[in-house]
Amino acid sequence: MSKPEILLVRPIMPLIEDGLTKHFTLHKLAEVADEAVFFREVGPRIRGVAAGGAGKADRALIEKLPALEIIANFGVGYDGIDVKAAAERGIIVTNTPDVLTGEVADLALGLLLATVRQIPQVDRYLRAGKWLEKPYPLTATLRERKVGILGLGRIGKAIAERCAAFGLDIAYHGRSRQADVPYRYYDNLVAMARDVDVLMVVAPGGTATHHIVNAEVLEALGPDGILINVGRGTVVDEKALVAALRDRKILSAGLDVFEDEPRVPAELIAMDHVVLLPHVGSASVYTRNAMGQLVVDNLVSWFEGKGPKTPVAETPWPRN
């Protein structure tokens, strides 16, 4: 019996490629010489897609694959997948939640500490020999700060637990109040920004969240405010953020994500009072291996008739 045929949209970690090769007939789009010929001759046999990162699955790709049953995304965020187009055809979409929750939450707290206490700047100060001249200036503190979390999902909750361990007051904003959490809920993002000192962005990308952290929100955060973003770069209006930092309308920012990755605005790079990371929230060997294995497991489970392991909210599963 022939193996199901899977399309790998872009090169990905060896663990995934090896796992897919073991269980399926794997086609790598990056190695296709003529895409038009490929989609005409092989496209009708493709039943699964592995995507994630730079490997997107938009409507145009989905429409070229008439037998497609499932798209397995590498990453908890899946804004690179056209879930609407997939749902119209009854195509399953999966992601890799849970296995990266703790790693991203840890990174978020590390980024917050690094930003507030200026850890990268202090490190550069010492290495430049400036400590021999005089002590580093006093920094801001986490003490008595209030944290507002934008997006209280799995990762947001894990961040909240860690913030609570630091003795920080916590609030959150999302589409609706969550009955099972003890934190203060705001139905208005500007109002929450006005009442907190740290705005922690954990929201997913997409049209619903595009630029919701705008100039008005940053103005409300205020001159002692700190923005941390470990969600998606598109959630924050980057031009408004640059202006707010330049004009000292907020104190600082710690960013792991950007609007047009891997291109980071030169204005941000030139600023010494911000901390910038190259989207490394889940980037440990341990966690990336777990994420990669979940991509493989979702596809294997589906084609063994056991259903998807981690379908996204918009996907048509379970079937009626």
Image (cartoon, rainbow, N blue to C red):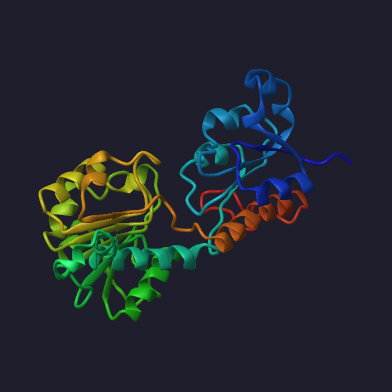
Q: Is residue 249 above or below residue 26?
A: below
* Residue 287 appears anywhere in the view: yes
Q: How many marks?
A: 0
* Residue 237 appears anywhere in the view: no
Q: Where residue 2 sits: x, y (%)?
A: 86, 39
Q: Is residue 172 above or below residue 295?
A: below
Q: Is residue 201 left or right of residue 309?
A: left
* Outermost residue to the right: 1
Q: Is residue 40 left or right of residue 234?
A: right
Q: Is residue 240 left or right of residue 32?
A: left
Q: Where residue 275 sits: x, y (%)?
A: 28, 56
Picture quarter containing residue 121? bottom left
Query: 227 and 60: which one is in front?
Result: 227
Q: Where residue 302 sits: x, y (%)?
A: 71, 51
Picture quarter containing residue 47? top right
Residue at 37% across, 64% down? 108
Q: Is residue 125 above or below residue 22?
A: below
Q: Where residue 43 sits: x, y (%)?
A: 69, 27
Q: Is residue 146 above or below residue 222?
A: below
Residue at 57% across, 39% down? 86
Residue at 54% across, 28% down? 60
Picture quarter containing residue 285? bottom right
**Picture quarter with the N terminus:** top right
Query: 123 and 157: which one is in front?
Result: 123
